[in-house]
């Protein structure tokens, strides 16, 4: 919880007079749906905290509150704000608006959740006049169907002025709450604003004087985000602000798992944005991810070790000749990539394993997100449907024949996938083969886009559904796939929020986490790993700021100053020419993960390393006297002059935006007499393949690193691909006082709620926060030779045949943390490196259903 300085709690005093009618029903529903008591209790606690930061609905004076709740993708945000809505209604809020994403599919799904958790009626059936079961109670209505809120929208349709006008007679002077679930769409918002103005003009001041709560689900998408044309963003953003401005008492709460855009609300006019925009100036609440959450950290950090195979991730490298990542609306598709066929077989085996574990009643889904075009999605659906039919035919004919059935190529292929993926689990192949037909015979392949939505989990059958969902944008944000087990994901957008929201595989996977698998290109995996670390750091920053009693404005400034902001702000207002970004380097990590492959630059950088080592040796720091540590040789007390001279000589690649030495030297220069006068220096050396390297009078073992081989065309060595890491994990612990390191680890365990015996991979930032001196790392790296398909790429002759030099710096916390330095981004080069966002509108081609 981060609050503004004027926050005054009101809820504790009001509690005695609040009848928790709506919350009581919702609490019973959560327990009935199988949520553990601890989860329900935690939801109760945190929704009280959020409600207490809204305006007091019984305070008869004008107020306006703006806040944000930062959760995790697919972690239960909808359940959280449904609980908040119930409590707000109990407290006295009489008009509640939920803005639920930009697609009909997501709006309809959100309406269903609100129907079940708050209204207690199926609004779609209520809207179908003449139906005998039109008043059927559902969800909370089964516990108590009194005080039914009035809904001006339903599961069949978004807000319509004529429907709303006819329903106002039912409001009964607002004795029950009125709720709307609307799409984040310019036309819908215009209709709502017009309707409110018309009613106000008729003298219905009762409506405008009601305390209004606006929940902005996926708050970073189109409310402030960089998506769509700038004109459209401005419209929607302005309409939301107009909506809030129509009420004398209003609250805005944005819910998101990817708050980058909200925090970066127009960084060039911060003060104006803080006053005028949807910046969460009054409070920011961070929701902890439960220990059983199958999220980015678990998959892309903990599950992606440096030296061994990934736990859940699998690579797509066979698509370009069949279905390139970048393709046109008329892309032909006569066959499927082998990796997609393997993913399909894996899914069928996983469904069988889940059934054998007693999960036959649970839904089981597979996601294929490979194209932005509905036409291409249809072709993918057809090809998968054909292969599924072939597999089912083989199972019907030969599945019951035991080992003899392995003569069938389809069954043999299934068994090979089982050997590679699941042979270490509790069931042998004989059991799986025998149970597979019954487990997957009812599997369906469906599209989910603007022209079709085959997702329907409402069947009351005792057998869970087995669905293979093919889609694009509709499957990229907010929409839940029940029991998602296997994913084949072929997208490469570099937008932080878009990419993370595409991760529909995040969530809760109790009882089947070990059979989940995700296929994606290695570049996308690198990006997810990078974003997972940035997002995790964002949540940790929020916790630090709570302890420091910082305000949301402080938090916004700190996050916008973070080096990660280069990516976000560069895309935020790309334009052309140059983009100037102010970055703070206090408590920051900078590394040369992108190094020039030009022969002259490599030579100059090696010469700079030689002069650096000669200078430190002349100052008394020889290799034989250095501390031998894990990862190389540590020198203590190296003077800042040697560091500055090295950076001055460094040849930086023009696409390596963060390692521009001008801003870094400027930051160091302002602190060279005190904070950054004396440095720890690590010269890397490891035991690895290949000969040792001789640099000046030093003999070291080069680190072995792969690169993004496609970037060689730009004379760029992308170390570790787009994951952008040259250093090994744990390097920032080197040189830190052992007692301080232990305290930092203990603090991290307490924040993450892990015991002392738990195996933890500590993030480097916890050591950076307690450093006494800056750490400069001189990297000596040998590029790993390409293997497999990478060995066929062009420009491999540009791979250096000798070790190369890189560097990284761990800056400690500064006494002047708000002081920033200016980086300059060439936006043309930025586009060349990162490409355009792949969600730009394309008339008639997208499945976006405005």
Image (spheres, rainbow, N blue to C red):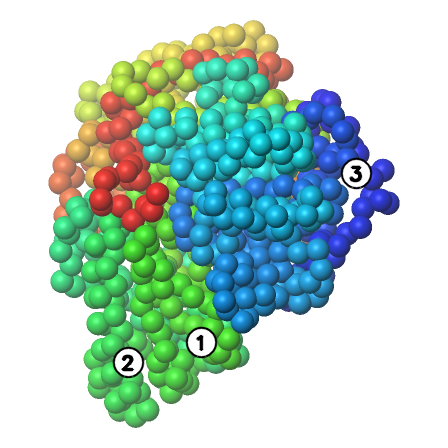
Where does residue 579 sit, x and y in percent of width and height?
Answer: 35, 17
Q: Residue furthest front?
A: 202
**Disc number placed over residue 397 in the picture, else none:** none
* Label disc, if present, on residue 353 of the rendered structure: 1
Marked residue nearer the N-terminal end (1 or 2): 1
**Residue at point 71%, 32% (across, down):** 55
Decide which of 92, 150 is in the foreground and name it.
150
Circle 2 or circle 3, nearest the eye: 3
Which of label 3 and label 1 is nearer to you? 3
Q: Name the quadrant containing residue 598.
A: top left
Secondary element under disc 3, as helix, strand or loop, is helix
Q: Which residue is mark 3?
A: 11
- Quadrant of residue 516 in the image? bottom left
* Label 1 to label 2: alpha-carbon separation: 17 Å
Left or right position of 106 against 403: right
Q: Is residue 328 above or below residue 735?
A: below
Write the residue at 35% across / 26% down. 231
Residue 748 position in % (x across, y down): 64, 41
Name which of mark 2 and mark 3 comes first in the sequence. Answer: 3
Disc 2 crowd rating (10 Å Cα; few below 14, some 14-19, many 20+) is many
Crowd band around label 3 with a 10 angstrom C-alpha radius: few (<14), some (14–19), many (20+): some
**Separation (CA) of disc 2 from disc 3:** 59 Å
From mark 3 to mark 1, how far is it between C-alphas?
49 Å
Q: Residue at x 48, y 42 (%)?
A: 161
Element type at marker 2? helix
Task: Say left or right for 814 vs 7.
Answer: left
Query: Residue 697: x and y, percent?
Result: 36, 23
Which one is closest to the eye, mark 1 or mark 2? Answer: 2
The residue identified by callout 2 is 392
Position of the N terminus by quadrant: top right
């Amino acid at each position: 919880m981060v609050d503004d300085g004027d926050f005054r709690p009101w809820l504790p005093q009001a509690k005695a007079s609040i009848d928790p009618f709506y919350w009581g029903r919702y609490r019973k529903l959560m327990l009935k749906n199988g949520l553990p008591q601890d989860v329900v209790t935690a939801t109760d606690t945190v929704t009280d905290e959020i409600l207490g930061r809204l305006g007091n609905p019984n305070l008869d004076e004008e107020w306006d509150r703006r806040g944000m709740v930062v959760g995790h993708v697919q972690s239960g945000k909808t359940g959280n704000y449904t609980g908040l809505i119930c409590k707000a209604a109990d407290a006295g809020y009489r008009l509640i608006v939920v803005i639920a994403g930009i697609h009909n599919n997501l709006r309809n799904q959100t309406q269903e959740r609100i129907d079940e958790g708050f209204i207690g009626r199926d609004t779609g059936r209520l809207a179908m006049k003449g139906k005998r079961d039109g008043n059927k109670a559902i969800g909370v209505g089964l516990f108590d169907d009194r005080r039914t809120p009035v809904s001006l929208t339903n599961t069949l349709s978004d807000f319509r002025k004529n429907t709303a006008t006819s329903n106002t007679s039912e409001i009964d002077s607002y004795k029950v709450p009125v709720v709307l679930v609307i799409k984040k769409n310019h036309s819908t918002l215009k209709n709502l604003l017009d309707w409110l103005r018309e009613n106000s003009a008729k003298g219905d001041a009762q409506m405008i004087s009601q305390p209004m709560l606006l929940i902005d689900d996926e708050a970073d998408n189109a409310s402030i985000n960089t998506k769509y044309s700038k004109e459209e963003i401005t419209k929607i953003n302005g309409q939301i602000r107009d909506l809030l401005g129509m009420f004398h008492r209003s609250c805005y709460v944005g819910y998101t798992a990817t708050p980058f855009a909200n925090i970066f609300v127009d960084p060039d006019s911060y003060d104006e944005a803080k006053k005028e925009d949807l910046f969460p100036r009054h409070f920011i609440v961070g929701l902890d991810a439960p220990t059983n959450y199958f999220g980015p950290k678990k998959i892309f950090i903990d599950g992606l070790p440096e030296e061994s195979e990934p736990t859940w991730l699998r690579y797509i490298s066979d698509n370009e000749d069949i279905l390139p990542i970048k393709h046109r609306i008329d892309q032909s598709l006569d066959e499927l990539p082998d990796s997609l066929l393997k993913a399909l077989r894996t899914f069928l085996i996983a469904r069988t394993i889940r059934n054998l574990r007693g999960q036959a009643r649970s839904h089981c889904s597979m996601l294929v997100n490979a194209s932005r075009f509905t036409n291409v999605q249809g072709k993918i659906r057809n090809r998968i449907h054909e292969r599924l039919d072939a597999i089912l035919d083989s199972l019907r004919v030969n599945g019951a024949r035991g080992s003899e059935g392995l003569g069938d190529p389809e069954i043999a292929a299934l068994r090979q996938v089982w050997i590679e993926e699941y042979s270490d689990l509790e069931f042998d192949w004989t059991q799986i083969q025998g149970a597979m037909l019954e487990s997957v015979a009812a599997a369906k392949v469906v599209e989910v886009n603007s022209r079709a939505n085959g997702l329907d989990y409402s069947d009351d059958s005792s057998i869970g559904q087995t669905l293979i969902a093919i889609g694009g944008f509709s499957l990229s944000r907010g929409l839940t796939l029940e029991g998602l087990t296997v994913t084949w994901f072929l997208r490469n957008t570099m937008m932080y929020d878009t990419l993370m929201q595409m991760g529909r595989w995040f969530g809760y996977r109790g009882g089947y986490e070990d059979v989940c698998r995700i296929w994606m290109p290695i570049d996308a995996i690198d990006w997810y790993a990078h974003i997972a670390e940035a997002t995790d750091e964002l949540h940790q920053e929020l916790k630090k700021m709570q302890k420091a009693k910082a305000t949301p404005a402080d938090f916004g400034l700190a996050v916008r100053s973070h080096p990660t902001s280069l990516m976000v702000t560069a895309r935020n207002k790309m334009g052309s020419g140059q983009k100037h970004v102010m970055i703070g380097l206090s408590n920051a990590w900078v590394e040369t993960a992108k190094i020039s492959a030009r022969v002259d630059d490599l030579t100059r950088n090696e010469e700079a390393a030689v002069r650096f080592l000669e200078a430190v040796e002349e100052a008394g720091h020889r290799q034989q006297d250095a501390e031998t540590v894990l990862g190389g040789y540590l020198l203590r007390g190296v003077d800042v002059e040697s560091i500055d001279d090295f950076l001055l000589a460094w040849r930086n690649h023009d696409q390596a935006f963060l390692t521009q030495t001008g801003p870094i030297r400027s930051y160091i220069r302002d602190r060279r007499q005190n904070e950054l006068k004396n440095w720890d220096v690590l010269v890397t050396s490891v035991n690895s393949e290949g000969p040792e390297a001789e640099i000046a009078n030093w003999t070291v073992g080069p680190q072995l690193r792969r690169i993004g081989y496609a970037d060689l065309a730009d004379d760029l060595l992308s170390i570790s691909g787009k994951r952008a890491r040259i250093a090994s994990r744990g390097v920032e612990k080197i040189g830190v006082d052992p007692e301080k390191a232990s305290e930092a680890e203990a603090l991290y365990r307490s924040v993450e709620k892990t015991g002392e015996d738990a195996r933890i991979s500590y993030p480097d930032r916890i050591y950076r926060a307690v450093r006494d001196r800056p750490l400069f790392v001189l990297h000596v790296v040998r590029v790993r030779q390409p293997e497999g398909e990478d060995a066929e790429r062009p420009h491999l002759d540009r791979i250096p045949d000798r070790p190369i030099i890189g560097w990284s710096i761990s800056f400690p916390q500064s006494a002047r943390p708000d002081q920033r330095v200016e980086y300059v981004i060439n936006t043309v080069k930025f586009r060349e490196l990162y490409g355009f966002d792949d969600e730009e509108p394309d008339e008639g081609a997208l499945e976006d259903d405005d």
